[in-house]
């Protein structure tokens, strides 16, 4: 598997070798791929002999708190670094307060699998055909001969599993399965990953999801619309992130081509998740200021009109999608 040019790999090694200290940035609301790739790269570079920090400026949702090495996702980080690496983010705004550290650092590398945005970098390794940033990090580590121990392999496997939707999303390719197999050969604990992601759901989360399924609306016969409100989150004592898989499950219903889930993140901030079978939802997301992939994308609605205004606006967008 060789999707990254030799020149870029050589420059990556050169920049790592020249750095006395390295910072790695995660994006806002870090997901499995973001944390998996960031924690794995941090561990590998540390085992390579480098001084590495993972800038943990945001919180981690409960459903990912089992990840190995998560204690290294820390607020104990420097103001600047010789080398600052941004993973899984195509836009500077996605790395939040870490942008100040990036701007003060000497050199910057960006590694991402989203459509190339405005993230700056002295070296940019961007491949929007890759199903996960973990796939790109795996290629970097293996082709450069950087260490991959059992924990690093488990972290990469975790990100690969989550961002491919258990290897079901459209851009999951033959290389993805080869990488997964190699990671297992290297000691990735797949049973540990699957248990924590999919077989250890708290009862209150299960009940929260059930209410979302039961109150979801069918639109035009082939689309689903659901709303995860702050009221429901408080009712069941869960986090808004516990609705993570609801849009996927609604999309999976026979005859449904597209599912939309509106999530209340704050009094004026509402995130919209889109999941599809045969529709390019990334176009819908980009048209509304967001982004993502062909079958999994999202955008944010900002409004002072509360959840009623946000759901009405999202519903109109869904109604206008030809599915």
Image: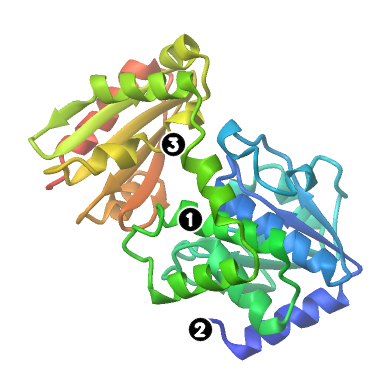
Residue 310 image-quadrant placement: top left
Residue 111 circle label = none
Separation (CA) of disc 3 from disc 2: 31 Å
How dense is the environment of label 2, judged by Cα within 10 Å: few (below 14), some, or many (20 and up)? few
For marks 2 and 1, the one nearer the N-term is 2
Q: Can residue 91 be seen by looking at this rendering? A: no
Q: In the picture shown, does residue 39 fall above or below 184?
A: above
Task: Give how far across and how far down residue 130 sits, in percent.
Answer: 45, 69
Q: Earlier in the sequence, mark 3 or mark 2?
A: 2
Residue beneath label 3, please? 244
Mark 3–mark 2 CB contact (< 8 Å):
no
Dot 3 alpha-carbon crowd within 10 angstroms: few under 14, some 14 to 19, many 20 or more: some
Mark 1, residues whose alpha carbon is within 10 Å: few (<14), some, or many (≥20)? many
Q: Residue at x 56, y 82 (%)?
A: 4
Q: Position of residue 113 (x, y in %)?
A: 49, 64
Q: Residue at x 87, y 67 (%)?
A: 50
* Cβ atoms at labels 3 and 1 below 8 Å apart: no
Residue that numbered label 1 is attached to: 161
Circle 2 SS class:
loop
* Residue at (48, 29) in percent of width and height: 242
Secondary structure, mark 3, is loop
Q: Position of residue 211 (x, y in %)?
A: 32, 18
Q: Which residue is mark 2?
A: 1
Asked if one can make out residue 130 in the rendered structure from this viewpoint, the answer is yes
Residue with the most extreme bottom position: 6
* Upstream in sequence: badge 3 or badge 1: 1
As displayed, is residue 80 above or below residue 28? below
Q: In the image, which is nearer the foreground, mark 3 or mark 1?
A: 1
Return the x and y of residue 148 as percentages of the image width and height: 71, 70
């Amino acid at each position: 598997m060789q999707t990254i040019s030799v020149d870029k790999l050589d420059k990556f090694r050169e920049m790592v070798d020249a750095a006395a200290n390295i910072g790695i940035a995660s994006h806002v609301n870090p997901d499995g791929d973001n944390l998996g790739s960031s924690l794995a790269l941090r561990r590998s570079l540390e085992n390579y002999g480098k001084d590495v920090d993972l800038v943990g400026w945001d919180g981690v949702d409960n459903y990912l708190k089992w990840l190995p090495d998560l204690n290294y996702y820390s607020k104990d980080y420097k103001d600047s670094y010789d080398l600052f690496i941004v993973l899984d983010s195509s836009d500077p705004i996605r790395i939040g307060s870490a942008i100040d550290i990036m701007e003060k650092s000497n050199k910057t590398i960006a590694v991402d699998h989203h459509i190339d945005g405005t993230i700056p970098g002295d070296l940019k390794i961007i491949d929007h055909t890759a199903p996960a940033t973990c796939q790109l990090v795996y290629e970097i580590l293996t082709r450069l001969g950087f260490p991959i121990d059992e924990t690093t392999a488990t972290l990469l496997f975790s990100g690969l599993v989550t961002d491919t939707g258990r290897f079901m999303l459209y851009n999951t390719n033959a290389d993805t399965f080869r990488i997964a197999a190699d990671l297992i050969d290297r000691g990735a604990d797949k049973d540990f990953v699957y248990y924590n992601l999919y077989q250890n759901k708290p009862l209150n989360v299960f009940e929260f999801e059930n209410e979302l399924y039961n109150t979801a609306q069918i639109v035009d016969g082939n689309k689903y619309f659901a709303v995860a409100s702050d009221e429901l989150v408080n009712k069941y004592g869960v986090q808004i992130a516990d609705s993570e898989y609801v849009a996927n499950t609604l999309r999976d219903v026979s005859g449904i081509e597209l599912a939309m889930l509106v999530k209340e993140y704050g009094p004026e901030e509402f995130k919209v998740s889109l999941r599809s079978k045969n529709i390019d939802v990334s176009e819908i997301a980009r048209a509304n200021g967001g982004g993502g992939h062909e079958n999994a994308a999202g955008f944010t609605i900002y409004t002072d009109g509360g959840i009623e205004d946000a759901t009405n606006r999202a519903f109109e967008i869904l109604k206008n999608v030809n599915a």
